Amino acid sequence: MIRLMRDDGIEILLNVKAIRQVEEGPKTTIILVDGEQILVRNALFDISTKIKAADLGRLEEERVLAQALAEVKKQLREETGETEKTPD
């Protein structure tokens, strides 16, 4: 989700997966995957930066969760006395 300012001054949170395209003109237009268009005060560069930051945050979250899951699996193996399975 990214925080944007609609053209009418209302702040919104927008799911980046809903964005199909962003057009910069006199006003920046966000076109959603369902065809809806939203006029925002944010510049194209600002929106692009926010999308990149959201993607990086999501990737970091996935990395941390994968690391935590691996640690939990390791602890379970230690508690049950199982050995780590290796691929054939």
Image (cartoon, grey):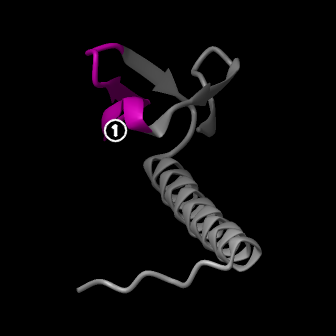
| Residue 36 in which image quadrant | top left
Residue 24 relative to residue 52: left or right: left
Q: Residue at x 49, y 60 (%)?
A: 52
Q: Quadrant of residue 76?
A: bottom right
Disc 1 residue type (three-letter): Val
Classify 10 Å Cα crowding around label 1: few (below 14), some (14-19), many (20 and above): some
Q: Is residue 8 above or below residue 27?
A: above
Q: Is residue 68 above or below residue 22?
A: below
Residue 58: in magenta span: no
Query: Start and end of the magenta stretch?
Result: 17-36
Q: Position of residue 69 (x, y in %)?
A: 63, 64
Q: Residue at x 70, y 67 (%)?
A: 72
The residue located at (76%, 73%) in the rendering is: 79
Q: Could you say whether the residue bearing mark 1 is in a helix, strand or loop?
A: strand
69 above or below 23?
A: below
Judging by the rendered image, the residue that carries numbered circle 1 is: 22
In the rendered image, the quadrant that contains the N terminus is top right
Location of residue 24 in the rendering, given as x and y in whole percent from the top left corner: 35, 40
Q: Which quadrant of the figure has residue 38?
A: top left
Vertical side of 7 occupied by 80: above or below: below
| Nearer to the camera, 5 or 68 | 68
